């Protein structure tokens, strides 16, 4: 694994031929604008679920310190969960694209469609949904976990948007591969 600052690297060794199809997707800025309402909706829904299904609704709201701590903890945990879903081949990198305000992980080799979807959705499942489920089932609550859950749901909006694009436009038996920001697929 490497660290990278700047736009997602191009993978010059990958030259898509006619067997690869370019997945239609917006530019990074447009994607973020389209994904923001989705993320806000998911975050609000999760906050309401935390307030109604756990004892959190009967206690004090998360403090500013807890919200700030959740923000600081969420970004590295979110990217680490994406990375944990990559095959262990040394072909992964974690990056930050300052001009787009994007943190990302990037895998430079082909991935099966189901694996690609798992990479995209793991942070939402592990950081937003699983803590809520555990607290609901155990009838406990943690303001910090609730804050991480809601903040991560907002951060995961681009991942959820991308998963929706993949799920609706790419066959599940396809192989996907990144070339910079762009995604190609073939069966």
Image: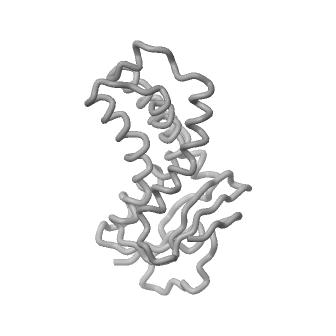
Numbered disc total: 0
- Taking the image as drawn, is residue 155 in sight? yes
Placement of 129 over or under 92, stated as above or below: above
- Taking the image as drawn, is residue 164 in sight? no
- Residue, far left: 137
For the residue pair 18 and 158, the one nearer the viewer reads as 158
Q: Residue at x 29, y 24 (%)?
A: 139
In what quadrant of the picture does the C terminus appear?
bottom left
In what quadrant of the picture does the N terminus appear?
bottom right
Color style of the picture? one colour
Residue 100 image position (x, y, % from top left) = 69, 54
Q: Residue at x 56, y 51 (%)?
A: 76
- Residue, far right: 99
Placement of 106 over or under 91, stated as above or below: above
For the residue pair 173 and 1, the one nearer the viewer reads as 1
Asked if residue 174 lies left or right of residue 184, the reply is left
Placement of 184 over or under 141, stated as above or below: below
Q: Residue at x 50, y 41 (%)?
A: 152
Residue 22 image position (x, y, % from top left) = 49, 72
Residue 68 image position (x, y, % from top left) = 62, 33
Residue 86 image position (x, y, % from top left) = 43, 67
Q: Would you identify the image quadrant in which residue 185 lies?
A: bottom left
Placement of 69 over or under 48, stated as above or below: below
Q: Residue at x 54, y 84 (%)?
A: 14
Asked if residue 111 lies left or right of residue 8, the reply is left
């Amino acid at each position: 694994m490497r660290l990278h600052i700047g736009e997602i690297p191009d993978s010059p060794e990958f030259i898509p031929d006619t067997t690869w199809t370019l997945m239609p997707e917006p530019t990074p800025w447009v994607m973020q604008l389209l994904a923001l309402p989705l993320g806000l909706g998911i975050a609000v829904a999760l906050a309401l679920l935390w307030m109604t299904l756990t004892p959190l609704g009967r206690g004090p709201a998360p403090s500013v310190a807890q919200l700030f701590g959740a923000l600081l903890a969420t970004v590295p945990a979110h990217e680490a969960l994406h990375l944990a879903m990559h095959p262990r081949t040394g072909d992964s990198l974690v990056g930050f694209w300052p001009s787009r305000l994007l943190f990302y992980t990037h895998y430079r080799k082909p991935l099966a469609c189901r694996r690609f979807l798992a990479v995209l959705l793991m942070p939402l499942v592990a950081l937003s949904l699983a803590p809520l489920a555990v607290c609901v089932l155990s009838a406990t609550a943690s303001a910090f976990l609730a804050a991480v859950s809601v903040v991560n749901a907002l951060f995961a909006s681009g991942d959820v948007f991308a998963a929706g694009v993949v799920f609706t436009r790419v066959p599940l038996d396809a192989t996907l591969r990144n070339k910079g920001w762009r995604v190609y697929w073939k069966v």
